[in-house]
Every structure is written in C-alpha cells, then in structure tokens.
Amino acid sequence: MSTAVATKPPAAEPEAKSGKVKMIGIILAVVGLAAGGAWQFALKPKGEVEAKPGEVVRLEPIQVNLAGGHYLRLGLALQLVEGAHEVDGSPALDSAITVFSGRPVGEVNKPEAREELRHDLEELLHERFHGDVMEVLFTEYVTQ
C-alpha cells in the first residue's frame, strides 16, 4: 500500500484579487484623467468674461489745482458694469484729485497724456469700486 498524499495546486485566489485591485486602480486613473480633461476643455471658465456696460453715473464737475497756479475743471461720468447700481461718486472724485493734482498744465493738455491719466484713473477706480466701474468718461475738461 502506498501512502500518497494528495497535494492541492496552489490557490489562485490571491493573484485574482490583486489583478482585480490593479484593474480597478487603472479604471479609476482613466476616469480621473477623463474628468480632468473634460474640465479643462469644456467646463473650465474661459479667462475673464468681458463685462457688459450698464448704467452711466454722471458726477458733478470739480476744480483740480495744477502746477504753477493753473487749474483743471474736470467733469466725470462712470460707466458701470451691468448689475452695478447706486455708486457713491466720492471715491471717484478723490481718485481724480489724486491723479491730476500738481501736474503741469502743458502735460494735462496733451491728448496722449490725457489718455494715460484716464487709464491711471480707471485702474484706481477699478480697485476702489471692486470692478463695478468699467470706464471713465470726461464730460468736462477745461484748463486755465
């Protein structure tokens, strides 16, 4: 009589489980990449959305002292973005005084310098009004 012990082949279960885990990991990575790509190309906001013009607020003209005893009578209107209402013009007038005060009359009379000053004023107002002012319009611009 022979005594033979039957041996079982090694269990394939651990390999099957590790294969399933790897497959799930690969699938999750692919789904994650696909979702990221969809966000990047289709759903992500495209830079800054250009604001639409809204209400125009006209401010009372002011006199600003220039260099050499001259002055500038400056009237402003603020082009607001759509949805912005009832802004207080005081910060805009204060900013205009800051930008124009003490400048030589010859400088403020040059068209290119005037546009540069307007741009400087618009940047200040963009900060002070948190983006509610999109443009500054001159309604009066008289030097003496």
Image (tube, helix red, strand yellow):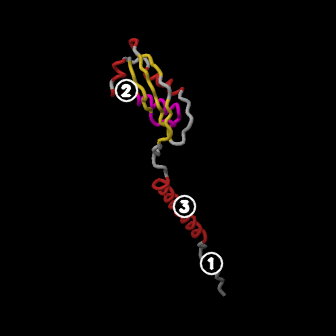
- Which of the two labelled residues, at mark 2 and mark 1, occupies the earlier sequence position? 1
Secondary element under disc 3, as helix, strand or loop, is helix
The type of residue carrying mark 3 is: Leu
Relative placement, left or right, of 9 versus 68 is right
Queried whether the magenta region covers residue 117, the answer comes back as no
The type of residue carrying mark 2 is: Arg
Q: How far apart are marks 2 and 1 (CA)?
A: 97 Å
Q: Which numbered circle lies on residue 73? A: none
Q: Where residue 84 sits: x, y (%)?
A: 54, 39
Q: Which quadrant of the structure image shows residue 3?
A: bottom right
CB contact under 8 Å: marks 3 and 1 = no
Q: Where residue 81 sits: x, y (%)?
A: 50, 40
Mark toward the viewer: 3 or 2: 2
Range covered by the magenta-colored residues = 118-135
Q: Looking at the rendering, in which quadrant would you find the C terminus?
A: top left
Q: Where residue 37 sits: x, y (%)?
A: 47, 56
Q: Name the residue under label 3.
A: 28
Q: Which numbered circle lies on residue 114? A: 2
Secondary element under disc 1, as helix, strand or loop, is loop
Q: Which quadrant of the structure image shows residue 90?
A: top right
Queried whether the magenta region covers residue 131, the answer comes back as yes
The type of residue carrying mark 1 is: Thr
User: Quick check: 64 above or below 123?
Assistant: above
Q: Name the residue under label 1.
A: 7
